[in-house]
Image (cartoon, rainbow, N blue to C red):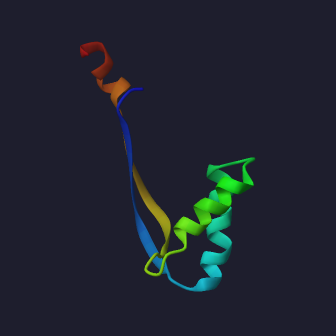
Amino acid sequence: MPPATVSVIGRCEILKDAETKRWFYPALAAALIPRNQQRQAGFVKMLDSPRRVVMCVIPERLITFDGRKMGVLGEV
């Protein structure tokens, strides 16, 4: 896999309320661990910790780096 990164610059809202966490954690788990409800439930349980927050970033600018375009793979 070639070296690649993306940086996101934007405005961020920190969400701490229980209602957001109740819908977001299961949605994130379903997206990351499809077709395995048992693992999803474990992931949601792990996420649900007292000081955890949800960060909602509204992107204003993306900065990307693709090592293939810089000739990095040809030098390795």
Which corner quadrant of the image does residue 45 belong to? bottom right
Above or below, 39 relative to 64: below
The residue drawn where x is 67% and y is 62% is: 41
Image coords of residue 35 (percent x, y): 75, 47
72 or 38, which is in the foreground?
A: 38
Instruction: Evaluate whether residue 57 shows in this view.
Output: yes
- Residue in view at x 60 percent, y 84 percent: 18
Most distant residue in the left direction: 75
Residue 32 percent location from the top left of the image:
62, 50
Rendering coords of residue 51 (x, y %): 43, 80
Outermost residue toward the bottom in this view: 17
Residue 21 picture quarter: bottom right
Image quarter (top left, top right, bottom left or bottom right) of the N terminus: top left
Residue toward you, 36 or 74: 36
Which residue: 33% across, 29% down?
Answer: 67
Q: How many marks?
A: 0
Compared to 42, does 50 lie above or below? below
Give the camera-side residue of 13 and 38.
Answer: 38
Above-or-below relation of 6 to 48: above
Left or right of 71 in this view: 41: right
Position of residue 37 measured from the top left corner of the image (x, y, whole percent): 73, 55
Determine the residue positioned at 46% across, 79% down.
14
Q: Is residue 53 left or right of residue 5?
A: right
Residue 71 in view:
no
Q: Quadrant of the C terminus?
A: top left
